């Protein structure tokens, strides 16, 4: 992928301030809103079924995150998703904890089956559970056996392309090595920091960032998701680089959002570690 594609994708976010309707979990909702603001988007959070059709109508995209399920939020997700589909807005699905319980796995599958999902963003265990192929999962964390490594990168990319072909969505599988794929192409992204796993919400924030990139780059969805994933990973690296002796994971969280806010196209071009996979 040409570096300018990443720079342009970020520039489109900054220049258009995409408004994103986020139905996300109550553990991370504040950080998701701040991450969206930092990257150049604008968040609206609402899950009330009587409210969401109107909210979705004034937004450009929709995030569905199943991290804290209840009947009202699920009803809101379907109502908002149906309206987003009517309007042709991108829908980004985050199947948090799919595989950890029958409810989560079934609900993620129902959302994918009934709504025109544009992007699926999760760790490998969650995405495999969504695809029906995971035997175990560790709550919202990736099962060690599912982790993407240099040794299994080719097979993981093949799985991602196959699932993208089956669903018609761009699939972003994130971890130590990220894979972003559509039915034809897959890219590895080797940015990020291990400290991102030491705060709650890094993945949820990324999903919202990916939605902003999808709204602002609707004609190049795959490239936009590569840019979003690489940008978040690069922000993690910058945040880690700021850590000093007195700092802990709460400082890292603040530095991460700061790094998203200050991320520029030239820095993304220079720092993104992206490679197309065979």
Image (spheres, rainbow, N blue to C red):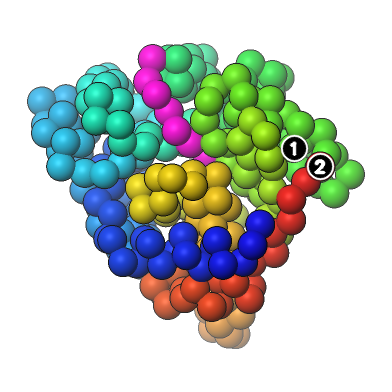
Question: What residue do we see at 82% from left, 33% from top?
Answer: 155
Q: In the structure shown, which secondary structural element does the residue marked by tag 1 occupy?
A: helix
Pointers 2 and 1 in contact (C-beta within 8 Å):
yes
Q: How far across and how far down the image is residue 106, in percent?
A: 48, 14
Magenta stretch: includes residue 154: no
Visible in this render: residue 39? Answer: no
In the displayed structure image, the side of residue 194 where residue 267 appears, left or right: left
In the displayed structure image, the side of residue 114 where residue 83 appears, left or right: left
What span is in magenta?
114-121
Question: What residue do we see at 60% from left, 19% from top?
Answer: 166
Local crowd size for mark 1, using a 10 Å CA cut-off: few (<14), some (14–19), many (≥20): many
Is residue 51 positioned above or below 206 on the image?
above
Question: What residue do we see at 61% from left, 35% from top?
Answer: 182
Query: Which picture quadrant has residue 151?
Result: top right
Where does label 1 land, which residue? 157
Q: How far across and how far down the image is residue 179, in percent?
A: 67, 45
Front residue of this view, candidates 134 and 153 = 153
Q: In the structure shown, which secondary structural element does the residue marked by tag 2 occupy?
A: loop
Local crowd size for mark 2, using a 10 Å CA cut-off: few (<14), some (14–19), many (≥20): few
């Amino acid at each position: 992928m040409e570096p300018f594609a990443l720079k342009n994708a970020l520039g489109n976010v900054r220049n258009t301030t995409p408004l994103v309707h986020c139905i996300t979990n109550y553990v991370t909702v504040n950080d998701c809103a701040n991450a969206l603001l930092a990257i150049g988007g604008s968040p609206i959070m609402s899950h009330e079924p009587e409210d969401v059709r109107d909210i979705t109508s004034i937004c450009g995209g929709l995030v569905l995150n199943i991290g804290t399920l209840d009947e009202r939020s699920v009803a809101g997700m379907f109502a908002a998703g149906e309206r987003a589909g009517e309007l042709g807005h991108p829908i980004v699905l985050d199947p948090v904890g799919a595989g950890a319980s029958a409810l989560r796995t079934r609900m993620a599958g129902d959302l994918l089956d009934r709504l025109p999902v544009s992007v699926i963003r999760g760790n490998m265990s969650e995405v495999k559970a969504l695809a029906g192929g995971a035997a175990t999962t560790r709550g919202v964390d990736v099962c060690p056996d599912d982790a993407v490594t240099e040794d299994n990168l080719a097979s993981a990319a093949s799985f991602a392309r196959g699932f993208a072909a089956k669903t018609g969505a761009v699939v972003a599988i994130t971890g130590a090595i990220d894979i972003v794929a559509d039915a034809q192409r897959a890219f590895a992204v080797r940015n990020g920091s291990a400290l991102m796993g030491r705060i709650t919400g890094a993945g949820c924030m990324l999903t919202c960032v990916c939605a902003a990139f999808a709204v602002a780059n609707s004609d190049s969805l795959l490239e936009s998701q590569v840019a979003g994933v690489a940008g978040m990973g690069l922000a993690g690296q910058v945040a880690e680089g700021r850590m000093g002796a007195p700092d802990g994971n709460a400082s890292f969280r603040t530095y991460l959002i700061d790094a998203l806010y200050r991320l520029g196209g030239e820095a993304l071009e220079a720092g993104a570690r992206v490679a197309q996979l065979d």
